[in-house]
Amino acid sequence: YPLGALAGHLLGTVNTDNRGIAGVERMLDEAGRAEAVQGPSRASGPAVRMSLDIGVQHALAEELKQASARYSASAAAGLVLDCGSGEVLGAVSLPEVDPARPTDWLDPARADKLVGGTFELGSIFKTLTIAMALEAGTADLDKIYDVRQSLIAGPYAIKDPYPQGRPLTVREIFLHSSNVGAGMLALEAGAERQRAFLARMGLTEPMRTEVGPVATPLLPRHWGRIETITVGYGHGLALAPLQFAAAVAALVNGGMKVTPTLLARSGDGGDRPRLVSAGTSARLREIMRLNVTNAQGTGRHAEADGYRVGGKTGTAEMPGRGGYREKSVISSFAGAFPMDAPKYVVLVLLFEPQTGEGRGDHITAGLNAAPTTARIVERIAPLLGVLPRRVELRTPEPSPFDAPPAAQ
């Protein structure tokens, strides 16, 4: 393993009999494609081309390590996904594992957080809630909701993290990350419609990759009023980050399903089902970009000069004994770039950060996960051939996956 721990979780490892027991090593053995060679000999079979871009992988790993130290996080994970082909170009989970050290795989703290665990992801889930409302026709971006009062859900009073003291449009609900607004949107659509939409987006059933199954989603046992509200703002439902990233890719690429792959693909992944309309996708791209460019957006620190980042922050309290732990959070940013015609999804997660950018003990995602995303994009965009442009287009370019206009 000449690159050491780089991409260790994906490469996997072998046992004392030289049999693959994890990752690509296991995949090759199970497919009968692994050959024993000695010395300088080369295997006779065709090479397996992974989707990873080594430059992207290195930059992602380095930036996440620096972010973990900068914000005193206990762990971190990040993903770069081609939102056309579904190729995983970078995937990092910290603490990392070294394929040459099999004992690393016995440490639960080193488990792959992108596929091996499920997490309540918090407010990044509001992207899906708004997409659901737009698809159902129960709301548009200009519809106004009175979010000034707490939303009562059984014994709980749902409040906003950043109360604005006035009614908000759907666009502003996203911008200010209103829990009350997201809960109202979810209630308006209803539990059945919410569950059906998440199923359509591929978030209620287990996902598989070439190296094995992804952790099974944890869904509410009973899907009533309380659950509808909390799922609306990203609690009460736990997902593997890779599975969530695939849904985000579909939301921004024009609405077409994305199946993540660890193997190199040619083209855009072939014919795929449509998950949301091209119009819904365009509106989501609009508000995701606005969340970064607007001075009041929670994602404003994710801006990478010239690369047109868009996305949503999330600060999710982690569950513990007796309930959620207020000071133990997963800070995340789910975004894409360039937002005028998205090519890549970036997902960043920081576990239990203790600080934020220049704000002491402020641990919200806008002050740690968002600036981490900016640093990542600034490094990987040139590697991926994305040219900087510092003038915003008045009308966003259509995604290459958008449906063509109807004949007049």
Image (cartoon, rainbow, N blue to C red):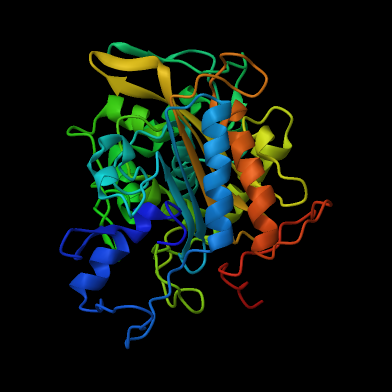
Residue at the (17%, 59%) spot, across then down = 16
The residue nearer to you, when weighing 264 against 316, is 264
* Extreme residue toward the front, this view: 39
Q: Quadrant of residue 273?
A: bottom left
The residue nearer to you, when weighing 189 against 78, is 78
- Residue 302 image position (x, y, % from top left): 65, 38
- Residue 30 image position (x, y, % from top left): 19, 71
Residue at the (15%, 64%) spot, across then down = 17
Q: Quadrant of residue 381?
A: bottom right
* Extreme residue toward the bottom, this view: 44
Left or right: residue 309 compared with residue 20: right
Left or right: residue 12 compared with residue 16: right
The residue nearer to you, when weighing 350 against 296, is 350
Residue 165, placed above or below residue 255: above
Residue 328, placed above or below residue 17: above
Q: Quadrant of residue 146?
A: top right
- Residue 200 image position (x, y, % from top left): 33, 55
- Residue 149 image position (x, y, % from top left): 49, 12
